[in-house]
Image (cartoon, helix red, strand yellow):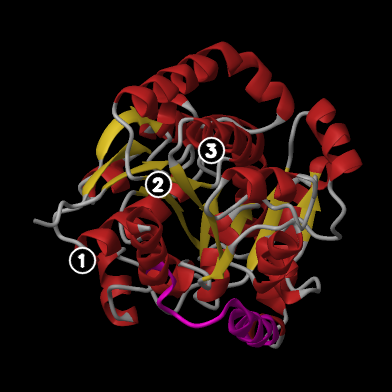
Amino acid sequence: MFLAHEVMIVTGEASGDLHGAGVAAALKELQPGVRLSGVGGQAMAAAGVKILYDIKELSVMGFVEVAKKYPHIKGIFNKLVEILKMDPPDVLVTIDYADFNMRLAQAAKNLGIKVVYYIAPSAWAWRRGRAKTIAASVERVASIFPFEADVYREAGAKVSFVGHPLLDIVKPSLTREEAYRYFAADPARPLITLMPGSRRQEIETLLPEMLQALRLIRERQPDLQAFLPLASTISHDLVAEMCARYQADIQIVAAHTYDLLAISTFVIASSGTATLEAALLGTPAIITYKLSPLTWLLGKLLVKIPHVGLPNIVAGQRILPELIQGEVQAEKIAAIAEEWLRDAGELPRIREELRMMRRKLGEPGAVKRVAQVILDVAGD
């Protein structure tokens, strides 16, 4: 009699939760009896994963910020290793969350557990030596970028290039007309979406500048509509209080984010997955990125790529503007936004470049290909 596989999926961030949920759904489609557990959030739980620890306990960004929360994160790590030891899965799937998951992958290997690393650390961008570390500790790297696959193969890893999962995930569920009705928005007026991030420190650092920029833009464009989709890891009260403090006329929403992005004139976003999601929907973004001064200085020593925004990295050129560290100012955000709204040809030009960027990410079907890789490794 065939026994269904047991798979543990571990991530530490909101974007990883979405990817984990996609993998979980694909695994259940390919093997309905598969047993799933792991570290994730609402999306993975809804996909049928037994949540051992919620990502809210792990979601933090930057060297300095991680150091403050290290004892708690280390405690969760130790408990996961104990679970792996006492009740080992057929395969551990690590998704993003580099430093934590690299150590967990090594611990799993030491226990004789096979590991598939999906959305592996960005060794192509910084700390290239990590590729060799991962090659020595995982059974397979499921790579989402062609240039990433090359780096890991050179490091000795067994790699499956699966394509980018967002090509499967990022799709509107409503027509444009339905989306405008759902959000009670006017298609004749500009619509800006603010995406300040999925971590508390991003909200506290970036959202004030975004809200002040919104006020400046409205001085010239009074009919502007503004929305803010809330990440599952962020408290509604935190964001609502901040919007009230800055007297922002903005609607906070918690559903149909891709439909909102699809009808947005443009977005103002924290650098990360959200900028690529918007790009895949053909929506331009003003990318903002700000860390603590010490974290930024350390990062500059390690990161060796010319761009921070994923759409720009994939395209190999700066398609979208990037405001970094001290450049994250309401006045500078507003100036770019006003130029885009004033120049009728600029946004269409950017949308065409985003369409060209999309072609570099491969074909749809990545999530199902990852699930098959996982089952193949589990069954070897």
Alpha carbon distance from label 1 to label 2: 18 Å
Instruction: Look at 80% across and 45% down and name the residue there.
Output: 127
Q: Is residue 373 left or right of residue 179?
A: right
Query: Closer to the observer: label 3 or label 1?
Result: 3
Instruction: Look at 47% across and 18% down and name the residue there.
Output: 78
**Which disc, if any, is residue 17?**
2
Q: Which residue is mark 3?
A: 105
Residue 12 can be seen in this image: yes
Alpha carbon distance from label 3 to label 1: 26 Å
**Which disc, if any, is residue 29?**
1
Q: Which residues are magenta?
A: 349-367
Q: Residues within 10 Å of mark 3 (few under 14, many from 20)?
A: many
Relative to 368, say whether 156 is above or below. above
Instruction: Look at 72% across and 68% down and name the residue there.
Output: 150
Quadrant (top left, top right, bottom left, bottom right) of the N terminus: bottom left
Sequence-wise, the earlier of marks 3 and 1 is 1
Residue found at the far right of this picture = 301
